[in-house]
Amino acid sequence: MIKKEYEKMVGKIKEVLEREGSVQLHEFFEKKYFKMLLNKVRKLKFNKKFNPLQYKFKEIQFNDMALVMAINGFIMHLIKKEVKEAKVYCFEAGDYTLLNDKIHEQEEYSITFELTPKWDCSYGGYTYFIENNKEKAKVEPTRNSLTIVKTNSRMQKFIKYINHHALHKGR
């Protein structure tokens, strides 16, 4: 399920995460498992979330506890915390989240598994982490990747508007 190379490199990955504050692992899942995961996600019925001053996207609680439990060992080695719940988000043309002065991250980690089959950077949709009005991390939607960002209460996060070039493609 998780590529064996990453399981062997936990120490090095942890070093990078501690030094840089974020890490992105490409081709994280084995190809066969990633395809199976994509098929599961395609069958989900998403709920629309819309507050024009804060966000527009779709989401659903991901209840595949077998997946959550399987990745917990890897995550535990990296950050000493357990994944307790998972949500799947879908962003399409016209979707976004905005910075809001009242909403900040917590002292924890933001963990993202990018399940987008194919994404063109010209569509937008980057995830930005801001700290003290400066960009701390810019996360590109990269197929089959795991991104971990160490967050704190001075940080905020937003997803850049997904423009008309995305058409009916989602991430």
Image (cartoon, grey):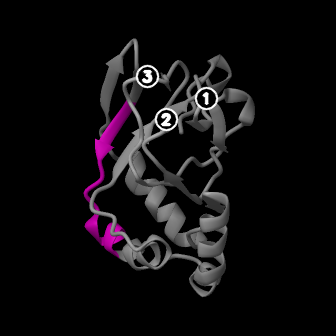
Instruction: Compute the Cα span from label 2 to label 1.
Output: 9 Å
| Number of the label disc, if any, that sits on residue 101 | 3
The image position of residue 56, as x and y in percent, is 41, 22
Closest to the observer: 36 or 166?
166
Taking depth in this image into account, of 133 and 111 the one nearest to the observer is: 133
In the drawing, does residue 110 fall left or right of residue 20? left
Q: Residue at x 62, y 36 (%)?
A: 126
Horizontally, residue 84 falls left or right of residue 116, namely left
Q: For mark 2, what is the residue?
A: 156
Residue type, mark 1 in image: Asn
Rendering coords of residue 129 (x, y %): 57, 39
* Cβ atoms at labels 3 and 2 below 8 Å apart: no
Q: Earlier in the sequence, mark 3 or mark 2?
A: 3
Q: Position of residue 116 (x, y in %)?
A: 56, 47
Q: Evaluate whether residue 107 shows in this view.
A: yes
For marks 2 and 1, the one nearer the N-term is: 1
Q: Residues within 10 Å of mark 2 (few under 14, many from 20)?
A: many
- In what element is the residue under mark 2? strand
**Going from the N terminus, do you reach mark 3 or mark 1 first?**
3
Judge from the rendering whether residue 60 lies leftward or rightward of residue 155; answer left or right: left
User: Which labelled disc corresponds to residue 133?
Assistant: 1
